[in-house]
Image (cartoon, grey):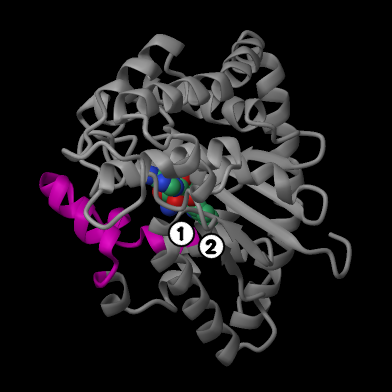
Amino acid sequence: MLQNEKVCFSGVQPSGNLTIGNYLGAIKNFATFSNDYRCFYCVVDEHAITVRQVPAELRRRTYETLALYIACGVDPEKNTLYVQSHVPAHAELGWVLNCFTMFGELSRMTQFKDKSARHADNVNAGLFTYPTLMAADILLYQTDIVPVGIDQKQHLELTRDIATRFNSVHPDTFTIPEPYIPQTGMKICSLADPTKKMSKSDENPNAVIYILDDRDTIIRKFKRAVTDSGSEVRMGEGKDGINNLITIYSVLTGKSVADIEREFEGRGYGDFKLAVGEVCADALAPVHARFDELMADKAGLEAIMKQGAENASRAAYRTLSKVKKKLGFVI
Ligand code: TYM
C-alpha cells in the first residue's frame, strides 16, 4: 500500500438474492471511490453462515455477488474484489477483536436483536459476535471510508469504538474509519410494508425488487407497491410508500425531489408507479447483460477472486503482524 493512500472497504453478504436496496444504498456507490481510494470490496461469506445456508446456494450466490459487483460498474482492474473466507486474516483478527469488545456492546446491537428474534432456534455465538468480524474486515485494511446503508451505522460506530479502545492500549495500530452513508438511498423500504427496510431475506418476493428481476416483474411489483389513499405525488409525513418510491426514482434519475414533484403534478400514483418501474428496469438492463456474460465464464470469475485474495492478503497480513507484535505474540 502506498503511504498516504486512502482506503475504502465494504462488503455484502451472499445470503440471499441482492435487492435494489443493496444496489442503491451501497453497491452503486462503490465504483465512485475507485479513483481517489484504494478499494477493497469483499463477498462476506463467513458472515453469511451466522444464519443457516444451503451450501450449494451459498456457493452460487458467492459467484453471483462477485459478478454483480462488476456488473454494477466496479472494475476488477481498479478495485480488489475477493471472498472473505479466502483471506484467513479476517477470522484471525476477528478473534483478537472479540477480546477487545464487551458483552454489553454486542448485546445492544439492533441487528443481533432482530436476527435472534427471527432465528430463535439458532441464536449462535457467531450471530452475537458478527460485529467484531465486521470490525476486523474494516480495520485489517486501515480503512478510511466504508460505503454502507443506514442499517450498518451502528456496526460502524462499534467498529470505531473497538479501534479506539485497541489504540488506547496499543497506540497507532488502526485507522479510525468513517461511514459513507448516501443522503438519498440510505434506506430503501419494502414495497409491501414501506415502514420496513427492503431486505433480501424478506419472505414476500413482492415486497422486494431483486437486482436480477426481469423487466416485467419489476414493473408489476412497482405497480402493486403499497401506497396511502391519496393521489398527489408529493413527499409527506405518513406517506411512507410514496416517499419510498420518490426516493427510488430520485436515486435512479439523479433528479431532485422538487423536480420529481413538479414532473408528476396532476398525475396520479398509477402513472408514477409505472414511471418508477420503467426507470428501474432501464437502469438494471445493462447490469443484467453484463452479469450474464460474467456468469458464463466461471473460470474468469475465479481468476478475479484469486487475484483479489492475493492482493487483499498482502495488505491484511501487514496489519495482522503489527497487531500480533503489539499483543506480545511470538511471531
Ligand atoms: P448486507 O449484505 O445486509 O447489505 C449490503 C449493503 O447493502 C446495504 N443495504 C441497504 N441500503 C439501503 N436500503 C436497503 N434496504 C438496504 N439493504 C441493505 C447495507 O447497508 C450494506 O451496505 N454487515 C453487512 C456486510 C458487511 C460489511 C462489512 C459491510 C460485513 N463486513 C464491512 C461493510 C464493511 C451486511 O450485512 O450487509
The span picked out in magenta is: 107-134
Q: CA distance from mark 1 to mark 2?
A: 5 Å
Instruction: Look at the picture and state if 210 lies above or below 22.
Output: above
Instruction: State whether residue 13 appears in this view.
Output: no
Kindly identify the residue that appears in the image at 48 percent across and 67 percent down: 156
Determine which of the numbered discs, if any, sits on residue 11 in the image.
Answer: none
Q: Residue 302, position in %: x, y?
A: 66, 23
Q: Main secondary structure of the magenta part?
A: helix
Quarter of the figure with the N terminus? bottom right
Inspect the image, locate mark 1, and give the three-letter code of the amino acid beneath it.
Leu
Kindly identify the residue that appears in the image at 51 percent across and 37 percent down: 23
Q: Is residue 128 magenta?
A: yes
Q: Residue 255, position in %: x, y?
A: 58, 42
Q: Quadrant of residue 236?
A: bottom left
Neighbours of disc 1 within 10 Å: few (<14), some (14-19), many (20+) = many
Q: Is residue 55 left or right of residue 181?
A: left
Q: Quadrant of residue 104?
A: bottom left
Decide if ligand 1 comes within 8 Å of the CB at mark 1. Answer: yes
- For label 2, the residue is 136
Q: Residue 142, position in %: x, y?
A: 69, 67
| 263 and 247: which is toward the camera | 263
Mark 1: secondary structure? helix
Instruction: State whether residue 321 appears in this view.
Output: yes
| 238 and 119: which is toward the camera | 238
Inspect the image, locate mark 2, and give the three-letter code of the amino acid beneath it.
Ala
- For label 1, the residue is 133
Q: Is residue 114 left or right of residue 243?
A: left
| 144 and 322: which is toward the camera | 144
Callout 1–callout 2 Cβ contact below 8 Å: yes
Q: Is residue 271 magenta?
A: no
